[in-house]
Amino acid sequence: MTPSAARPPLVERDAMLCRACGREGRASEGYPCESCGTFVCLVCTIRGVTRCRNCVEKAKST
Ligand SMILES: [Zn+2]
Ligand SMILES: [Zn+2]
């Protein structure tokens, strides 16, 4: 392995990309998608979105 460029140490920032709305949300405040377990932010959860966009689309088509 080649020595990679110095990676910044993990900052205390638990931002994750919400798979339902596409925005960043806090991993510690969001919930996993009911179907696949991917991150769904708190805002979406409050709105009643419990699944990521992919899973919602899948549910629609069935
Ligand atoms: Zn969201
Ligand atoms: Zn999902």
Image (cartoon, grey):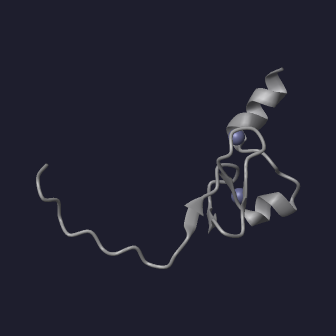
In this rendering, the answer to whether 36 lies above or below 39 is above
Q: Is residue 10 above or below residue 2?
A: below
Residue at the far bottom: name it. 12
Q: Nearer the viewer, residue 28 or 45?
A: 28
Front position in the image: 51 or 22: 51
Q: Is residue 38 above or below residue 46?
A: above
- Where residue 25 appears, as percent x and y from the top left, is 64, 66
Residue 59 in the figure: left or right of residue 52: right
Q: Residue furthest top?
A: 62
Q: Residue furthest front?
A: 1
Write the residue at 57% across / 61% down.
16
Q: In which of the image's four quarters is ligand 2 placed?
A: top right
Occupied quadrant, residue 27: bottom right
Q: Residue at x 83, y 20 (%)?
A: 62
Q: Position of residue 5 (x, y in %)?
A: 17, 64
Residue occupying image coordinates x 86% and y 59%:
47
* Number of marks in the rendered image: 0
Q: In the figure, residue 18 lies in which quadrant?
A: bottom right
Which residue shows up at 88% across the image and 54% down it? 48
15 left or right, relative to 40? left
Residue 30, given in percent of the width and then of the height, sits at: 72, 63
* Residue 58 spot, x, y in % from top left: 75, 28
**Residue 34: quadrant of the picture:** top right
Left or right: 40 in relation to 50: left
Q: Is residue 57 above or below residue 5?
A: above
